[in-house]
Image: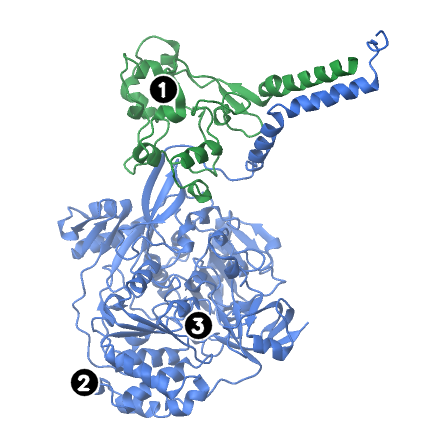
Chain colours: A blue, B green
Amino acid sequence: MKDHMSKTITRRDVLKFTGGGILGIMLSPLPWKLLDDSAIWTQNWSLTPKLSHGPITSAFSHCTLCSGGCAIKAQCVSGMPYYVSGVQSHPASYGTLCTRGLAGHHMAHHPLRIVHPHKFAGKSDNSRMTAVTLQESVDEIVKQIKNSKGSIVILDQQPNRAISGIYREFLNKIPNGLYVTSPSQEDSTILAIKEMLNKPAESFGFDFENTKLVLSFGAPLLDNWGTPGRMTAIRNSKSCKFVQIDSRYSRTAMQSDQWIALNPGTEKILALNIAYVLLFENLISATIRHSAVDFAQFKNNVKNFNPELTSSVTGITANEVKAIARELISAKSAIILSGADPGGGPFDSETEKAIASLNLLVGNVGKSGGIIARKEIPGYNNNYKQTQWTEIPEHSVSLLIVDGTDSGYTLPWSLIEHTLNRNDNLVVSFSPILNEVSAHSDYLIPAPAYLETITDVPTTKGNRIATFALTTPLIKKQEYTTEPIDVVKEIGKRLHLAIEIPTVEELLKQKVNAIYAEKRGSIYIYADQSSTNVNDLSSADELWTKLTEGAEWIDEECKQKQSNKYFFNLSPLSPVPLEKKGMPMIAYGWRGATSASQVSPILSKVFQETELRNVNGVISINPTTAQKLGIVSGESVSLSTKNGTMNVTVKIVPTVRPGTIEASIAPLPNGIETPMNPSGSNILNLCEVTDNGTWRITNATLLKV
Amino acid sequence: MKSTIIFIFGISFGLFIGWYAFPFALYRSDEQPIQFSHAVHTGEKGGMACEDCHSTNENGRFQGIPAVAKCAECHASPLGETETEKILVEEFVTPNKEIPWKVYSRQPDNAFFSHSPHVTLGKMKCEECHGPHGTSELLAPYQENRISGYSKNIWGAGISGISSEQWQGMKMDKCVRCHGDNSRHDGCVACHK
């Protein structure tokens, strides 16, 4: 007994006690509670951004990430938006927001936010960015304007805003001032039609709501084009037939009633094939014949485009062309438009004219369900001479100011670069974030991010009625940002230009005063879904207050008569197939029109994985092409064009046309919206820009690495 | 015999650590910025209902703890001579500064909970989840879990997390059980948006 109860603590006793202790702990909630708390702890890293706690409120504003003009309702906590949704009662968007709009409130927190004016020591070299003062940046711009003999260009990537008018006014006051925009515009068909009309209306819109047939030449109509909610509602109503002519099985082609797959780069030939059938099968009315001043010349130009003879070029049989032409007539109302994929590049002007001329031939211009006249917003003048990129002589630009509101994926840098003076050029970017274009600048002046400043939302391109709204700021403007208009004002002051440049708010109040002075239209208030005639408002201040609280000014229906005289003004053409040197590479904007806008870096969460696989650096080819070249899926190959070579990964997709390459211009592989390291490559910069200012098709070769 | 006793002693020690000492170590106790008596407001003297202060806004969104402006409706000047009343008026109501309450029921940011469908559509009473909080004389100290950072009330008063009271604890298993019992949708995205 004495032995058994020895007072000596042995190693065995310690182990027994420890074992008992562990068993005791295991029989308590401690392990499970620790496991639970540790799991929660892993969700609470100090680096995870957290919303502050406070009262939850909601506010109305408008999206300006593109020109769609959708109304948004933001849920805010302590005044900071944390969730954005569409506004059900908004007359154009019907409560729908596109993916970029839903994540728009992230933009102010973008990791590539420019937080100080910067100078790039070497162009495109992010590592050599040095902070400068705003004053130093303005000094440099003023010095460049004073000393240079070349052109001074402002690239406005969202034209038709109030500030666009200021840019044009400013450029008119300085020698060699040129105003340019991104070449791909959603209203390119309207612009082409305006050129053809003898006395065009102030503006035009597409009457999709009353049309029976929409014939689209590559326009991403059902992929964030125009006001996405409007297009989705029209598609869902099945009130009209969508026919998509596209050499690529695009998202719009997938959702359309009919996809006509033509050979790449043959849109002009197909448009003139349709014109041929309309003219030579006598499908057009006598009125149309008499309205066209140059009808005989046009018919003469079109006679070479017999679809029987060109079907091998376009890949569309004569019977198919005839069926399209007959359907355009039998539909009674139809809209034929292009407005190419902003990422994939614009059509050349002759193709635009050929497509636009079909609207005149079938008598759709100025007719319900066609392309109808609309008035401009009072105080806005968008009838200005816009310089095309192709009109700018090579190496003639001394100063380029980029109003950086887009993604940077709508314009190959090579197109800009060849206009810059080789020895003496300065590129300045007003952009809230570093993107593909701003990364090429000499000076970066950070502009306020989306929802940080008040801006105007003019009529959406293609809208049938003029509208006007304001983007009410919902996020506190950062102190390091400068309004582009204030920079222009400072430059004007330093150059002693005879121009009065107001502040943003003053400028917008001038526009609101102009609307009020016209007493036209009505104001639609989202909160109570009420509508008040502008005539019934007591003052312009009342109109301003309503607009800042969440409302839209909507114009009356335009009763303007359209002039019945027009000129096709089409150059003599012959159906020449594309010169083939290698394989045609079709660049396209990832998610259609989305590629034109800055997008949130965490937007990827809303996409399917298959979509995210189509990054810049991944190309798609048909299985037969792959077999012919001996390439397998996932293989790394060398993609070469006249502009350079890039190693890319191959994806094999049966919907790609045999013998062609499809290449998405974004997102970039190193992050959804991260500009390329200059040592890397970019599909957009491999695209060859033709003399016509288009980069839709580039001859490319693939070589196994 | 000796080793059995030692082993049992070890078990007892483990149980003591797990059941008794561990909760003390796990939670940090903090007082609320000022004291508040729900009983004074909801009792006979005050006669107020929960929703008089914890209301929903025009969008049907539950407003949680009322803003100081709500307190100011009655307490613009001190009601009584207590120290707490003086602090309330001088430090918060007069300068219109929000009271930094420590919220017992705050859920993780990745859990979406809306009071409206539960209270308005589900006709649930406040007490079903919050217990007798509405009749409490004093605000209990806020006990913060040192690891997770959340209130002890989320887990429940007992360290085992087991209680016969429905309002003890606000963990996901409670939500899932109640949704299951009432044949309500209980998919992941209902709460984790």
Q: Nearer the viewer, mark 1 or mark 3?
A: 1
Residue type at mark 2 is Thr
Q: Quadrant of the N terminus of chain A?
A: top right
Residue type at mark 3 is Trp
Residue located at (43% from left, 80% from top): A262
The disc label shown at residue A389, or none: 3
Q: Which residue is mark 1?
A: B134
Q: Position of residue A74 (x, y in %)?
A: 36, 44
- Crowdedness near tag 1: few (<14), some (14–19) or many (≥20) residues, C-alpha within 10 Å: some
Q: Nearer the viewer, residue B39 or A13?
A: A13
- Crowdedness near tag 2: few (<14), some (14–19) or many (≥20) residues, C-alpha within 10 Å: few
Q: CA distance from mark 1 to mark 3?
A: 71 Å
Q: Are marks 3 and 2 on the same chain?
A: yes
SS label for mark 2: helix
Residue contact at pointers 3 and 2, CB within 8 angstroms? no
Q: Are marks 2 and 1 on the same chain?
A: no
Q: Which residue is mark 2?
A: A287
Q: Nearer the viewer, mark 2 or mark 1?
A: 1
